[in-house]
Amino acid sequence: MLQRCAAALLTVLLLGSAACALADSEGVIVQSSCSIVQSGEYYMVYCFAQVHNNSSDIICLEAGSFDLHGGEQILATCEVSSLWPYFLNPGEDGYLFDIVPFEPDETGNPVVPAVTGIDYNIRYLTVNPEYGSFDLSAVSQIAQDDSGALTVICELTNMSDVDAYDPTVAFGLYTGEGSMIYADGMTLRDVGIPAGGTVLVRFAIDSVFVSQWQSYGVVPAEARVSASFRADDD
């Protein structure tokens, strides 16, 4: 999902909780963060947010945007690409992750974005339960080999009595203090999990992020994962 950057690291920003709270019938941005990396002459801002469905309805993303702030200045306004998973059942969490590029200036010099915060503006739709998703049982672990390479392994189990085709899985990485520092996800196209079956999904974390976390003394201690699928005839 994420663009891979053979890049020099700049900074990581943990932007705290309650960045944006919406009506009880919609979702809540619990916390957000961003990482800034250099890729050639560009600086890339990787933006992450944890979304919680605080309602009694199934919700999905209708539309959304976010502003990157540099102090009192808005550095960029961008559309939210997607919510992962696509549908959130009551009480569930999902994730937003987007990339904002900053081009060099007119003289070709890289522009370093001094990001101080992210402000999300999200609209949600209520979903008829008839068209909602079915949850998969999902557990995860963080693995690191001798070279320092980091992976997240997600074990998805289909506890339903129907086959789960094209399941979607998403996760957030958190520090021991509960701060989210990263998120990712994917839809497993043309993959089916038989009723009662289990599959393993492995996400490789780009070393550019691992090096950044290490330089700031930030350690991902927990991976929180959610996964679901829609009925084949939806």
Image (cartoon, helix red, strand yellow):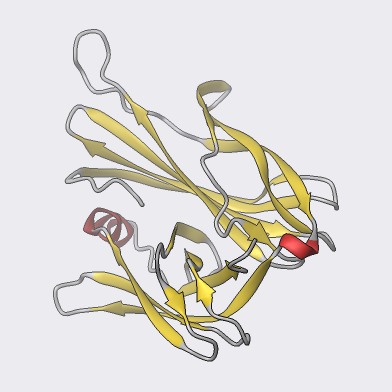
Q: Residue at x 75, y 46 (%)?
A: 125
Q: Is residue 31 left or right of residue 41?
A: right
Q: Residue furthest top?
A: 106
Residue 60 position within the rendered picture, expressed as x and y whole percent measured from the top left: 68, 51
Q: Residue furthest bottom?
A: 196
Q: Residue at x 59, y 56 (%)?
A: 86
Q: Is residue 47 left or right of residue 203?
A: right
Residue 226 position within the rendered picture, expressed as x and y whole percent measured from the top left: 56, 71
Question: Observer-nearest residue: 234 or 204?
Answer: 234
Q: Residue furthest left?
A: 147
Question: Observer-nearest residue: 31 or 53?
Answer: 53
Question: In which quadrant of the rendered view does residue 56 lie?
Answer: bottom right
Residue 163 position within the rendered picture, expressed as x and y whole percent measured from the top left: 54, 80
Q: Residue at x 73, y 54 (%)?
A: 59
Give the mark count: 0
Question: In which quadrant of the rendered view does residue 213 lie?
Answer: bottom left
Q: Quadrant of the C terminus?
A: bottom right
Q: Residue at x 65, y 73 (%)?
A: 134
Question: In which quadrant of the rendered view does residue 190 lie?
Answer: bottom left
Q: Is 89 drawn above or below residue 66 in the view shown?
A: below
Question: Observer-nearest residue: 166 or 154?
Answer: 166
Residue 34 position within the rendered picture, expressed as x and y whole percent measured from the top left: 45, 45
